Image (tube, rainbow, N blue to C red):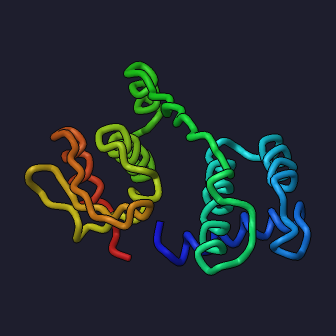
Amino acid sequence: MTSSSASRVYQHYLDKFLLFSPEALEDISMQHIVAYKKHIDENLQNTSVYMAFVALRTFFGYCQTMGYKTINYRAIQYQKYKVEPIPQIHDETYERMLALCDTTNFHGLRNSLAIRMLYDTGVRVRELVDLNTEQVTQQPCSATIFRRKLSKYRPIFWSQTTQNYLESYLSRRTPL
């Protein structure tokens, strides 16, 4: 997360917290934190609850560093959330999806290629959509993608079969 996006996320959660707290910083107590936690536990997913409490703890830590009289930021406890594994598709589901693509027409070929690329590489849909032909190398069936979530580049690799579909798709595609 970049610092500007982190700032926006923190601002969002701090704005929500203000609905549960008095206006004066020194009047905020643990009861306000508890009320806020109860509300967000009922209305947000675990990752969002975690981020909300990271934002609160960071904010109160900053306030203490600046000399404001506030609750002790170390008293704001939050649980690390467990990341649920993303369900994977089975080979038979993958094969059924491919069987639905009529590769004799352009759209079916495009859809088959997209399914194959997603399956072979594990990229996010947005990363696949953002992939440009300049990023693709012919050998060894690879490309370099930009990971928005991590703000980093990384190589991806796919099978020769997928490479064959890619070459067929690129030869039939009209330039933009």
For the point 40% across and 58% down, which residue is it?
A: 127
For the point 83% across and 43% down, which residue is it?
A: 38
Query: Looking at the picture, how far across and down is residue 14, in whole percent?
Result: 74, 67
* 17 on left or right of 11: right
Hey, which quadrant is residue 120 in on the image? top left
Out of 75 and 17, give the one closest to the viewer: 75
Query: Looking at the picture, how far across and down is residue 158, in whole percent?
Result: 22, 43
* Depicted 57 relative to depicted 42: above or below: below
For the point 41% across and 28% down, which residue is it?
A: 94
Out of 100 and 135, give the one closest to the viewer: 135
Out of 170 and 130, give the one closest to the viewer: 130
Query: Looking at the picture, how far across and down is residue 128, in whole percent?
Result: 39, 56
Query: Looking at the picture, how far across and down is residue 121, in whole percent?
Result: 30, 44
* 72 on left or right of 37: left
Out of 11 and 79, give the one closest to the viewer: 79
* Depicted 124 relative to depicted 134: above or below: above
For the point 69% across and 43% down, which residue is it?
A: 45
